[in-house]
Image (tube, rainbow, N blue to C red):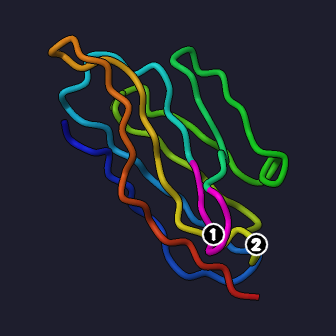
Amino acid sequence: QVQPVESGGGLVQAGESLRLSCTASESMLRIDRMDWYRQAPGNERELVAAIGSGGSTNYADSVRGRFTISRDNAKKKMMYLQMNSLKPEDTAVYYCNIRGLLISGRAYDSWGQGTQVTVSS
């Protein structure tokens, strides 16, 4: 079982933007849900944004209106998180979580290793 892979993190100033990407395993037959989480030092991991198989989305109150989650319909195993108007409190390690079904028939629920986002004031 291959982990999803995140990319796109970095160091930016407050007010700037970043786009995170997550690539799911090629072994997946079906993706039911793709989520972005984040964890800041000393805090629990929290759900930032979620997108279902039908395209429905959900956001944490703290990011609604600034962040946009999307899936690439051409590359169905890709997910993105566009982050605009970043704030220092958005600083965290961002993880993608993907749930679905593998080609083998086994259920799949896997986390990426995370990508660091740091926003300076």
User: In the image, is residue 47 part of the stretch drawn in magenta?
Assistant: no
**Which residue ends up furthest to the bottom in the rendered image?**
121
On screen, residue 20 versus residue 68, left or right, reads left
Q: Residue at x 59, y 78 (%)?
A: 118
Tag 1 near tag 2, CB within 8 Å: yes
Split into 4 quadrants, where in the image is the N terminus?
top left
Q: Quadrant of residue 83?
A: bottom right
Image spot of residue 20 (x, y percent): 49, 57
CA–CA distance in space, label 1 to label 2: 9 Å
Q: Would you place residue 96 above or below residue 33 in this image?
A: below
Q: Which amino acid lies under the numbered mark 2 shown in the image of this protein?
A: Glu
Which residue has dot 1 on it? Answer: 40
Nearer to the camera, 112 or 6? 112
First in sequence, mark 1 or 2: give its number.
Answer: 1
Q: Residue at x 44, y 65 (%)?
A: 115
Which residue has dot 2 on it? Answer: 89
SS of the residue at dot 1? Answer: loop
Magenta-tinted stretch: 37-44
